[in-house]
Image: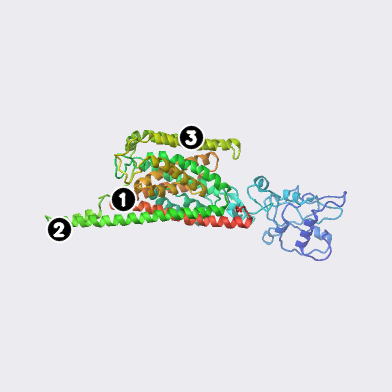
């Protein structure tokens, strides 16, 4: 590729020389300039200098304008030094130290250019390397992604690995995967996500649920997290809210039967093992099932749960409204021996049956100690089952091996054993306990209720929404009072989310900065949500608010999870994924 002869485009000469450097040397002897092609040919653009007339004048042209040159890389011929920095722009943009390149190559004066595209990719970093999905991390590094067998730029954050996001580089203009740092990448999406998570946390506090069916889609849609990132972060938020719920509920007594705790430990003891067993089986089937099947089952399940919860909530609201009117009529119909002032006072009391001042709801740990002593056997079985599952999750065997299947079978057997032990620990005589608002343990219910909890756990694991969103409507449908259902569901959520969160921390899946930010807001507004619900219950006696909050969380989960599911189906169709037929 010669540089002399007539006037010509400078960039054309550079391109010709760069391509010529890929050829094998044509002569064994002669001087070979050091340096080679060290920057992408496609990024070259430069102001066209005055075209020299001879080869000697071409050798005087300074082709790397505005870049310092080390003595090691300086060519052996004289180079004209730059005149005026303002008139010279950058020619090559890259990540490595600038070198001389693009010199005229003659038959007796060739540079040692790369012999193949693989060598060219090695000189230019990982961009353009051949890769496979299995070894993409080692072949493409953390900045690039493997796309159709070649290391290239990312399109969206889900293309990148865990704890990375896709962002345009300010220096190169490339779409690169960079580490997620919330404090340095804060934008309007983070603000919107935080506000929506705060609203969800307050509704979840009123319902006693975790809110994972809303948290995960928000993280996927607004922050662009992958499922592997969103689920651990969601579990951190859920366990933060669940801790607040359990602490505030553990010292409270049943609203109708004060000798019982508000958290029904007998129900947790009997249903939690079946719930855990169902989640285990559901997660296994989720991995091998096509996305369209999961979305169809999700729609059917959440629509039925929403219909039941909404109908029950509206029914309870109507009953409470009629009861409030009846109380007001009863008070105003009473004789007033003194004056109308007493009547006005009675009307005011009728409107405020709880006569509850606005006050912060605090935990009563002293009362919890008394209640725990009377429920020591159920609490012991609950903690024992939780500890065994924790040990199993931390020391999980490699998937699909013999040890893995033996471990899973062993855990299912443990669930059955704890259910049987709980059945034997139930009181033998339950005749003095009224049936209204409390689950009665009969020979039939002892067999039926654990089976229902197993189905609820299976749906939660199979659909990826957790068991709490299924257990809440189930307990209400079985006849439990809304206040007791709220507290008992919160206990279920705490047991499952704490196990998952500990496992994610052990596996290194946590995102500390994101988890600290969002969990802090969830904890704060779970407390405020609990305080607000407690005030409404004491002042207006509207327990239907709890049921309607359950319906609101289910509705939000239905909409958000459906959007995510349909998006995944479209993606699967485009890439030809397994559809089950």
Towards the viewer: 262 or 295:
295
Q: Earlier in the sequence, mark 1 or mark 2?
A: 2
Circle 3 or circle 2, nearest the eye: 3
Neighbour tally class for label 2: few under 14, some 14-19, many 20 plus, Cα within 10 Å: few
Front one among 580 and 172: 580
For disc 2, the marked residue is: 340
What is the spatial separation of the Cα atoms under label 3 and label 2, in whole angstroms? 66 Å
Q: Earlier in the sequence, mark 3 or mark 2?
A: 2
Identify which residue is drawn at 57% across, 56% down.
569
Q: According to the image, what is the colour scheme of the structure?
A: rainbow
Which mark is in front, 3 or 1?
3
Looking at the rendering, in which quadrant would you find the N terminus?
bottom right
* Residue 301 % position (x, y): 47, 53
Q: Is residue 371 left or right of residue 145?
A: left
Tell me if residue 510 can be seen: no
Q: Position of residue 54 (x, y in %)?
A: 84, 62
- Report the residue that reaches farthest toward the front: 444
Quarter of the image for the C terminus: give it: bottom right
Above or below residue 486? Residue 192 is below
Q: Residue 177: x percent and y percent?
A: 61, 51
Q: Which residue is mark 3?
A: 388
Label 1 neighbour load within 10 Å: few <14, some 14-19, many 20+: some
> Is residue 570 in view?
yes
Q: Which residue is mark 1?
A: 537
Helix, strand or loop under label 2: helix
The correct choice, above or below, for 74 with respect to 247 in the image is below
Please indicate whether residue 334 sits to the left or right of residue 275 in the image.
Answer: left
As measured in the structure, the alpha-carbon distance from the residue carrying label 3 to the one carrying label 1 is: 38 Å
Report helix, strand or loop for mark 3.
Answer: helix
How far from the left and from the top, in percent, is residue 196? 45, 54
- Element class at badge 1: helix
In depth, the one of 166 and 546 nearer the eye is: 546
């Amino acid at each position: 590729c010669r540089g002399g002869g007539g006037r010509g485009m400078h960039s054309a000469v550079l391109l010709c020389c760069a391509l010529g450097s890929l050829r094998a040397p044509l002569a064994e002897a002669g001087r070979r300039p050091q340096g080679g092609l060290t920057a992408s040919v496609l990024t070259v653009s430069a102001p066209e200098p005055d075209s020299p007339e001879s080869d000697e004048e071409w050798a005087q042209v300074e082709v790397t304008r505005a870049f310092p040159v080390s003595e090691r890389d300086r060519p052996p011929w004289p180079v004209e030094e730059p005149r005026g920095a303002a008139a010279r722009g950058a020619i090559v943009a890259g990540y490595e130290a600038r070198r001389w390149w693009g010199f005229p190559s003659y038959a007796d004066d060739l540079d040692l250019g790369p012999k193949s595209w693989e060598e060219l990719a090695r000189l230019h970093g990982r961009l353009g390397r051949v890769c496979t999905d299995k070894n993409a991390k080692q072949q493409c590094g953390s900045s690039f992604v493997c796309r159709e067998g070649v290391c290239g730029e990312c399109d969206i954050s889900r293309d990148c690995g865990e704890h990375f996001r896709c962002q345009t580089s300010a220096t190169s203009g490339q779409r690169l995967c960079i580490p997620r740092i919330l404090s340095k990448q804060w934008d309007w999406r983070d603000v919107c996500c935080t506000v929506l998570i705060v609203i969800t946390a307050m509704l979840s506090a009123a319902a006693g649920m975790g809110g994972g069916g809303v948290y995960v889609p928000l993280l996927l849609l607004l922050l662009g997290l992958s499922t592997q990132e969103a689920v651990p972060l969601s579990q951190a938020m859920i366990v933060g809210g669940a801790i607040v719920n359990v602490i505030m509920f553990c010292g409270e007594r049943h609203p109708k039967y004060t000798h019982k705790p508000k958290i029904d430990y007998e129900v947790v003891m009997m249903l939690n093992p079946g719930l855990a067993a169902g989640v285990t089986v559901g997660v296994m089937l989720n991995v091998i099932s096509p996305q369209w099947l999961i979305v169809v089952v999700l729609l059917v399940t959440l629509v039925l749960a929403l219909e039941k919860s909404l109908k029950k909530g509206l029914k309870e609201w109507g009953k409470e409204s009629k009861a409030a009117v009846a109380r007001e009529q009863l008070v105003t119909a009473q004789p007033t021996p003194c004056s109308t002032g007493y009547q006005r006072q009675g009307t005011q009391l009728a409107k405020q049956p709880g006569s509850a001042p606005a006050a912060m709801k605090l935990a009563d740990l002293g009362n919890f100690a008394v209640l725990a002593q009377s429920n020591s056997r159920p609490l012991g079985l609950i903690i024992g089952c939780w500890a065994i599952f924790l040990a199993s999750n931390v020391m999980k065997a490699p998937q699909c091996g013999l040890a893995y299947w033996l471990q899973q079978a062993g855990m299912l057997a443990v669930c059955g054993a704890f259910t049987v032990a709980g059945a034997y620990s139930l009181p033998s005589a339950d005749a003095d306990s009224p049936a209204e608002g409390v689950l009665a343990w009969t020979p039939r219910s002892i067999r039926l209720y654990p089976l229902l909890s197993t189905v609820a756990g299976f749906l939660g694991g199979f659909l990826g929404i957790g068991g709490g969103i299924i257990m809440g409507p189930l307990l209400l449908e079985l006849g439990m009072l809304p206040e007791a259902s709220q507290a008992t569901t919160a206990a279920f959520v705490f047991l499952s989310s704490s196990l998952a969160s500990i496992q994610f921390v052990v596996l290194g899946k946590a995102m500390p900065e994101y988890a600290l930010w969002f969990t802090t807001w969830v904890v704060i507004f779970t407390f405020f949500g609990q305080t607000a619900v407690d005030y409404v219950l004491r002042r207006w006696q509207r327990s239907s608010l709890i049921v309607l909050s359950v319906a609101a969380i289910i509705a939000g989960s239905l909409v958000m999870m459906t959007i995510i599911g349909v998006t995944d189906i479209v993606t699967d169709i485009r890439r030809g994924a397994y559809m089950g037929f």
